[in-house]
Image (cartoon, rainbow, N blue to C red):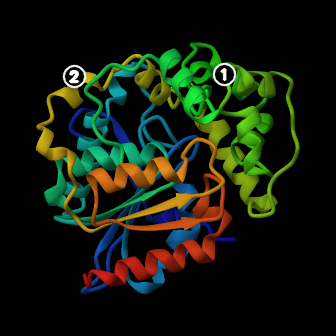
Amino acid sequence: MATPDLSLYKDVKVSRGFKYHYYYSPAAPGKPTLLLVHGFPSCSYDWRRQIAHLRPQGYGLIVPDILGAGNTAKPTDTDAFRFALIARDLVDLLDAEGLTKVVGIAHDWGSAILSRLANRHADRFHAFAWVAVSYFPPNRQPIDINELTARALAETGNERCGYWKFFSQPDAYEVCEKNIDSFLQLLYSVNPLDWYEWFTPTGKVQEWVETNRQPGIPDWLPQEEYNLTREKLSKAGLRSFLNYYTAQVKNTNLEDDRNLPVEADVIKNPALFIATSKDAVCRPAIGRAIMAKYVPQAKIVELDTGHWAYLEATERFNQELDAWLESFGL
């Protein structure tokens, strides 16, 4: 089982006062450092197989628990979860390790954070890779979650973001923590297509978790890895972490996005998008269209997986990452 060396974890207080916990392994001479940014409900442990694959090749690795996750600070104020502020936090980590430029690789909400790093701190990056969730362009218009889900349902037959309504409720963390196995077995589902019935429609995540459905764990997630994932999430809790959803529903990022110059929307660095064909939330066609508009030079690869491509198809994912990293000759 691939488990990151715990002795390589560090804690740093970033400029706005929060403690960040992160894995750091320096690069071999001539090799770049990779910043791996996880999403929800993960922590840095989710990148374990990529750490095990990339470190022996000499790549440097800096892999944080993002704000609200793992052993990083867990504020309850939604304003703390503005992507612009979290992006600055991660730049502080690069500064703490003396890293001038890195390659950014991200998944899920990590992809949104990496997108703001691309908009605001592109000079600190050689290249960007987005997994499942594509580049996340600034949104200068307020979101109404009911209108968003209704429009998605009308256009595609799938609400896509219906679960945001539950995750942004004040007591959602209590419901999910009480039945943590049910929650995890929906997120890391045996059949990714179950998300169409039980994840994206409004009210279905809450129904699933409150009735404590436990269909088991997928073949790609061995019992020992599931147990560690469960242990880490149980220890960290979900109260702070769910603020990523609350921030979206409350339009917490709106002013930051409006203050970005429009020319920052287009990303010029080398880029990769790994799409996930069985992902009910992150539909490849939508991601491809966004990349074509804002990151037209990006290489696009589509894997026949659900949301967790780097775990569901680890060997293929790592091969694609290797090929891309080698393609721009760092």
Q: Is residue 191 above or below residue 259?
A: below
Find the residue positioned furthest to the front. Answer: 155
Q: Label 1, label 2: how many angstroms apart (C-alpha)?
A: 27 Å
Residue 320 visible within the image:
yes
Which mark, residue 187?
none
In the figure, 34 relative to 250: above or below? Answer: below
Residue contact at pointers 1 and 2, CB within 8 angstroms: no
**Element under label 1?**
loop
**Percent position (x, y) of residue 88?**
23, 42
Quarter placement of the N terminus = bottom right
On the image, numbered disc 1 is attached to which residue? 202
Kind of residue indicated by mark 1: Thr
Image coordinates of residue 31 in percent, x first then y, are: 29, 82
> Which of the 4 image quadrants contains residue 79?
top left
Q: Residues within 10 Å of mark 1 (few under 14, many from 20)?
A: many
Query: Going 69% across and 34% down the picture, which residue do you hit?
Result: 199
Nearer to the camera, 136 or 8: 136
Q: Residue furthest top?
A: 170
The residue that disc 2 covers is 255
Q: Position of residue 303 (x, y in %)?
A: 59, 66
> In the image, what residue occupies the spot 58% across and 15% down?
169
Q: Is residue 298 left or right of residue 153?
A: left
Residue shown at 70%/20% (left/top)?
203
**Secondary structure type for disc 2:** helix
Whether residue 91 is visible here, answered yes or no, is: no
For the C terminus, which image quadrant?
Answer: bottom left
Residue at the spot 49% in from the left edge and 43% down from the top edge: 71
Sequence-first disc among 1 and 2? 1
**Disc count in the image?**
2
Say which of 314 and 27 sits in front.
Answer: 314
Q: Quadrant of residue 33?
A: bottom left
Going by the numbered disc 2, the residue's amino acid type is Glu
